């Protein structure tokens, strides 16, 4: 019953999505509003349908209907309810359905929220968002159905099919295979959906951009809608990247959070181009420049999103994510090619007609515009470098017949100077003015932050840091951070003449959400940067086999191995847990329980190494249980890392989220907003001009 | 068309500093930056490129000895040894002749083929990876030492699941019972 319901609703959603594409196109071409409205209703209807389909699958998972191949492969009787539900995205077919559901959610959101304000773009927004949804639903229905079931033929053979083949009867396994152990972690439960939200979210700005290109409605209205939706997608993409890092740190046992894995990179790429867009879009809003370029950035981001989905799932790159492989590679590639051709074609068409021409030229070489253009060049440089590094084996095999790979040293050596350049720009741009700034004004504006950064480097030198790269990196990050703090302080101070400090700060942020939300994001990035610099350059590691009562020392911490214990969890996993005491000097600060989980029922990936770590703001003492004496259990081997400042990566991430939420918060009253913004501008003006 | 002409007028009416000279300056600056970025990427590629080859190629191409390279092969389960005192992993891996769509089957055949070329692998200072098991695909970065052993600094493992997972084993039981 549930299965049939799921199949019927998915197929109906598929039909409606393609109907919406056709009706929307027809309505837009012939200017018949009735067709556009009909297309909208069809598009909106996909949401309840896919909600029912997803619920049907979730309920089957909870009930343990193991005749469904997907339920069998991702759940088992003993699993917790929580993991039975989240198994929706624990495998290929289910996560495709989940992807489609999110896509229809976003599309419905855009259609409802922007219907009135962006009315003229809407027919094509329906067309492009529904074409994307329609494509994913084709995969769902024809290639990887989450509702495919097991059937047994007369001669005992078991086959998989959506509908009962003639002469077979249902084959029902007694228990499921269970979710991939690596995915049984809270971080892994949230990481995929947030990344999907980021990926799917990027489809909406693209749909608006394509609508603008297709309709020729290239005034500022598409950019307004696109900017906000990009910000939403960007928020989830950032969150997904950070949670993915956290998951790798907790579960993969690398001792790190980022490994330049091709699939990680695939998620980073649209983040980079999205960030570039969020900056350069400001120039278009202020000056009417860079129209061609902004359009290109939206298209590139979308293509990178689809490419990321494609490379994660097709297994064309070697990666820690290769468990997500499946036969959907070829059809995804076709979609990627089609979407690219249509996007680039429309873009070129409007470009050569001169409809994307700039309204202004660059004026001074030192101006907000030119610094933003530099920022875009650096972001694109990182994008190209990461793209090339990730896909080098494929390109080199194609063109020189030899597979060449580029490892983490390549990424570190190429991106480090570029990230450094970004920190410099992050420090300079907020101090510059639109149009033109003179060098001496700029110098005066940056005097205090610059001196503070120099002071920071001096302090680090006094405390004995001699690594030139680290000093430079901390100095640059510090400069960007001090500029941001300085700018916020100036804003608050200007208001505080009339109001209490807290009120002044609250109103300042509330009334200039974009600007001060942006500053919070900058601060978040600086904090993350400091965490990355510290944990990359100053990471220490050691490994030892310890008998009970023996100890090892790393940094100022001493670890004593106490004993080993065994335990079994409700989901059947056997845990081997080492109890270790961590001393800071002579004081006991933590009892850690690094462990290894063994999953007797899982067919592959049946062990999982979970680190124990003692965290302070200063560093993480991170312990992995590597091996133990099976019989006597008297000794165990540990790999121990000291990761300085690593927690700043997570704290900076939170700050970045907060800033994005401030910047993306919907305006309640646009009119009043504009007036106050003008007053604000009059009060303390463009910083460098005061 | 009307839209374009208005934009054109606007940009002409605007008093700009973008005279011939300054535009050339922007151009030169832009080209210089692009050149620097290009240099960074090319230089990074040249100094960090690693050949990605099979066991067969490693054994036949003597010019690659001593270079840091990446190889791929099929892990032979019986040969896996782990010394937990020194954190040293040792195993033997077989050549994968050609990657096909069914990676699991390819790996299975590679491991069972007695004539496939094989190589001993040593990975030092690594915890025992969760995925190191029979018929896994191992991707190693390291060097071939003169004694014929491959010393790897990095070990990446892939475990295809389709082959064994295609059908649930308990089905027969349930239908029989």
Image (cartoon, rainbow, N blue to C red):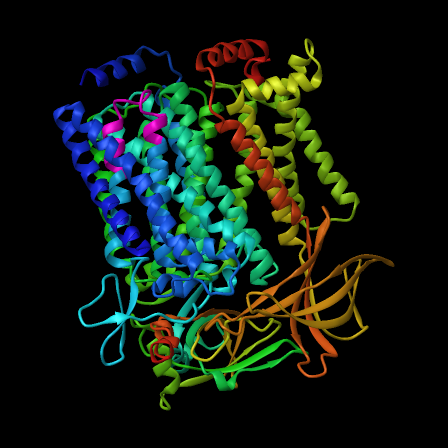
Q: Where is residue A302 in the image (x, y as percent from the top left)?
A: 34, 41
Task: Indicate whether B162 appears above or below A104.
Answer: below
* Mark count: 0
Asked whether residue A348 is drawn in magenta, I would say no
Closer-to-camera residue (A238/B125): A238
Q: Can you see residue B39?
A: no
Answer with the quarter of the image where residue A176 lies. Answer: bottom left
Q: Is the magenta stretch mostly helix, strand or loop?
A: helix
Tell me the quadrant of the picture where the C terminus of chain A can be found: top right
Residue closest to the eye, A51 or A358: A51
Question: Residue A425: percent from the left, percent from the top?
Answer: 53, 33
Residue B110 shown left or right of residue A268 in the figure: left
Q: Quadrant of the N terminus of chain A?
A: bottom left
Most extreme residue toward the right is A586
Q: Is residue B16 above or below residue B64?
A: above
Q: Position of residue A538 (x, y in %)?
A: 68, 54
Of all residues, the one furthest to the bottom in this rendering is: B114
Which residue lies most toward the left here? A30
Residue A471, by quadrant, is top right
- In the rendered image, residue A122 lying in the magenta stretch gets the answer yes
Magenta residue span: A110-129
Residue A207 location, quadrant: top left
Instruction: Identify which residue is drawn at 34% across, 25% down.
Output: A114
Give the residue drawn at x 66%, y 28%: A449
């Amino acid at each position: 019953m549930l299965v049939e319901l799921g199949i019927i609703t998915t197929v109906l959603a598929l039909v409606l999505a393609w109907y919406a594409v056709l009706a929307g196109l027809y309505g837009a071409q012939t200017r018949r509003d009735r067709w556009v409205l009909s297309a909208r209703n069809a598009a909106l209807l996909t949401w309840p349908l896919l909600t029912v389909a997803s619920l049907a699958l979730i309920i089957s998972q909870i009930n343990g209907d193991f005749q469904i191949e997907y339920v069998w492969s991702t759940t088992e009787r003993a699993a917790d309810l929580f993991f039975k539900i989240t198994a929706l995205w624990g495998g290929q077919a289910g996560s495709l359905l989940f992807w489609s559901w999110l896509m229809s959610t976003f599309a419905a959101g855009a259609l409802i929220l922007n219907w009135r304000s962006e009315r003229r773009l809407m027919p094509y927004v329906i067309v492009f968002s529904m074409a994307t949804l329609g494509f994913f639903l084709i995969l769902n229905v024809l290639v990887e159905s989450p509702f495919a079931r097991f059937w047994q033929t007369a001669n005992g053979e078991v086959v998989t099919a959506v509908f009962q083949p003639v002469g077979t009867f249902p084959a029902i396994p007694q228990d499921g295979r269970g979710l991939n152990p690596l995915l049984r972690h809270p971080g892994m439960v949230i990481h995929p959906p947030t990344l999907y939200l980021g990926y799917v979210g990027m489809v909406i700005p693209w749909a608006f951009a394509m609508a603008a290109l297709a309709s020729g409605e290239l005034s500022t209205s598409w950019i307004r809608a696109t900017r906000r939706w990009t910000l939403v997608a960007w928020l989830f993409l950032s969150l997904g990247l950070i949670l993915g890092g956290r998951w790798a740190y907790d579960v993969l046992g690398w001792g790190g959070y980022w490994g330049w894995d091709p699939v990680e990179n695939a998620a980073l790429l649209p983040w980079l181009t999205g960030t570039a867009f969020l900056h350069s879009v400001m120039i278009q809003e202020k000056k009417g420049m860079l129209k061609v370029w902004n359009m290109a950035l939206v298209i590139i981001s979308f293509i990178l999103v689809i490419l990321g989905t494609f490379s994660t799932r097709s297994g064309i790159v070697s990666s820690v994510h290769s468990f997500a492989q499946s036969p959907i590679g070829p059809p995804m590639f076709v979609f990627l090619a089609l979407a690219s051709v249509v996007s680039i074609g429309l873009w070129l068409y409007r470009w050569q007609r001169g409809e994307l021409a700039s309204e202004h030229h660059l004026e001074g070489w030192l101006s907000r515009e030119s610094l933003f253009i530099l920022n875009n060049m650096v972001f694109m440089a990182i994008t190209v470098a990461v793209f090339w590094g990730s896909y080098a084996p494929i390109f080199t095999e194609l063109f020189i017949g030899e597979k060449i790979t580029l490892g983490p040293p390549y990424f570190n050596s190429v991106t480090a100077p570029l990230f450094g350049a970004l920190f410099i720009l992050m420090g300079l741009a907020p101090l510059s003015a639109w149009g033109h700034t003179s060098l001496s004004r700029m110098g005066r504006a940056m005097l205090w932050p610059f001196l503070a950064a120099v002071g920071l480097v001096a302090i680090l030198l006094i405390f004995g840091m001699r690594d030139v790269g680290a000093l430079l990196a901390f100095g640059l990050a510090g400069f960007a951070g001090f500029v941001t703090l300085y700018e916020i302080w100036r804003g608050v101070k200007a208001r505080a003449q009339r109001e209490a400090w807290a009120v002044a700060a609250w109103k300042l942020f509330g009334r200039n959400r974009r600007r001060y939300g942006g500053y919070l994001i900058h601060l978040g990035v600086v904090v993350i940067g400091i965490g990355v610099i510290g944990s990359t350059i100053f990471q220490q590691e050691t490994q030892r086999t310890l008998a009970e009562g023996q100890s090892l020392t790393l940094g100022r911490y001493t670890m004593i191995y106490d004993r080993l214990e065994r335990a079994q969890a409700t989901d059947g996993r056997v845990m081997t847990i080492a109890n270790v005491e961590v001393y800071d000097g002579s004081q006991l600060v933590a009892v850690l329980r690094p462990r290894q989980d063994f999953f007797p029922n899982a067919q592959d990936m049946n062990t999982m190494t979970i680190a124990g770590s003692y965290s302070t703001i200063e560093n993480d003492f991170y312990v992995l249980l590597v091996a133990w004496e099976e019989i006597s259990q008297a000794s165990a081997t540990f790999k121990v890392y000291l990761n300085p400042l690593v927690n700043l990566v997570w704290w900076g991430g939170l700050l970045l989220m907060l800033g994005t939420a401030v910047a993306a918060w919907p305006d309640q009253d646009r009119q009043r907003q504009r007036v106050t913004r003008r007053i604000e501008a009059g009060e303390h003006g463009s910083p460098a001009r005061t | 068309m009307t839209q374009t002409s208005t934009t054109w007028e606007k940009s002409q009416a605007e008093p700009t500093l973008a005279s011939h000279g300054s535009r050339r300056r922007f151009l030169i600056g832009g080209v210089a930056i692009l050149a620097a970025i290009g240099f960074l990427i090319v230089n990074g590629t040249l100094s960090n490129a690693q050949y990605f080859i099979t066991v067969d190629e490693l054994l036949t191409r003597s010019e690659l000895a001593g270079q840091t390279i990446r190889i791929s092969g099929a892990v032979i389960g019986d040969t896996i040894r782990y010394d937990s005192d020194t954190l040293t992993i040792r195993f033997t891996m077989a050549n994968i002749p050609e990657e096909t769509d069914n990676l699991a089957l390819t790996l299975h055949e590679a491991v069972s083929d007695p004539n496939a070329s094989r190589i001993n692998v040593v990975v030092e200072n690594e915890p025992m990876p969760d995925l190191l098991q029979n018929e896994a695909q191992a991707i190693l970065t390291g060097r071939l030492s003169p004694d014929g052993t491959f010393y790897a600094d990095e070990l990446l493992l892939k475990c295809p699941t389709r082959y064994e997972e295609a059908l649930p084993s308990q089905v027969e039981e349930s239908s029989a019972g």
